Image (cartoon, rainbow, N blue to C red):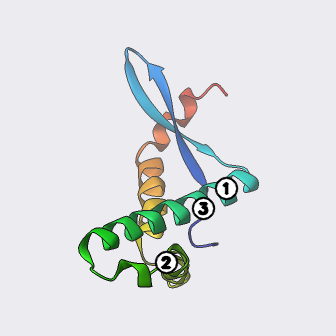
């Protein structure tokens, strides 16, 4: 789960008539919460995708897809790690807006 926890979140702020995403640090409990939600969301998306394409979809339960998502996160690959990496890249691109933060 350590490979899926995001350190930052992007908050919307209206600056000069346009909306900017400002990176903000997350406390540890919110990091864990977002990691668990991301794992569950991606596992359910994979299950729905598989159930619509496979004939024998009863053989693959949600627990199977959740286990596969956790295993992919352990190897630092998969949809959950990609989500974390995109958030971190956006936070790095928008780091010059940190000085306009008021919270």
User: Compared to 53, does 95 lie above or below?
Assistant: above
Looking at this view, name the residue that lies furthest to the left: 53
Residue occupying image coordinates x 57% and y 73%: 3
In the rendered image, residue 40, in percent from the top left (x then y), is placed at 54, 63
Looking at the image, is mark 2 or mark 1 earlier in the sequence?
A: 1
Which quarter of the figure has residue 67?
Answer: bottom right
The answer to whether mark 3 and mark 2 are in CB contact below 8 A is: no
Counting other residues with Cα less than 10 Å from the Cα at mark 2, is it few (<14), some (14-19), or many (20 or more)? few
Residue occupying image coordinates x 49% and y 61%: 84
- Of tags 3 and 2, which is closer to the observer? 2
Relative to the observer, which residue lies in front, 95 or 88? 88
Looking at this view, name the residue that lies furthest to the top: 17
In the rendered image, residue 26, in percent from the top left (x then y), is placed at 67, 49
- Image disc number at residue 73: none
Q: Is residue 6 left or right of residue 80?
A: right
Residue at label 3? 35
- Image disc number at residue 33: 1
Q: How many marks?
A: 3
Relative to the observer, which residue lies in front, 2 or 92? 2
In the rendered image, residue 39, in percent from the top left (x then y), is placed at 54, 66
| Quadrant into which the N terminus falls | bottom right
Q: Secondary structure at mark 2?
A: loop
Residue at label 2? 61
Relative to the observer, which residue lies in front, 74 or 90? 74
- Of tags 2 and 1, which is closer to the observer? 2
């Amino acid at each position: 789960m350590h490979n899926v926890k995001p350190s930052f979140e992007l908050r919307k702020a209206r600056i000069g008539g346009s909306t900017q995403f400002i990176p903000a640090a997350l406390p540890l409990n919110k990091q864990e919460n977002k990691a668990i939600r991301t794992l569950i969301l991606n596992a359910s998306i994979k299950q729905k995708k598989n159930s619509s394409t496979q004939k024998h979809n009863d053989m693959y339960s949600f627990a199977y897809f959740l286990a596969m998502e956790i295993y992919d996160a352990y190897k630092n690959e998969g949809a959950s790690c990609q989500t974390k990496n995109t958030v971190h890249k956006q936070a790095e691109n928008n780091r010059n807006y940190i000085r306009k933060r008021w919270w």
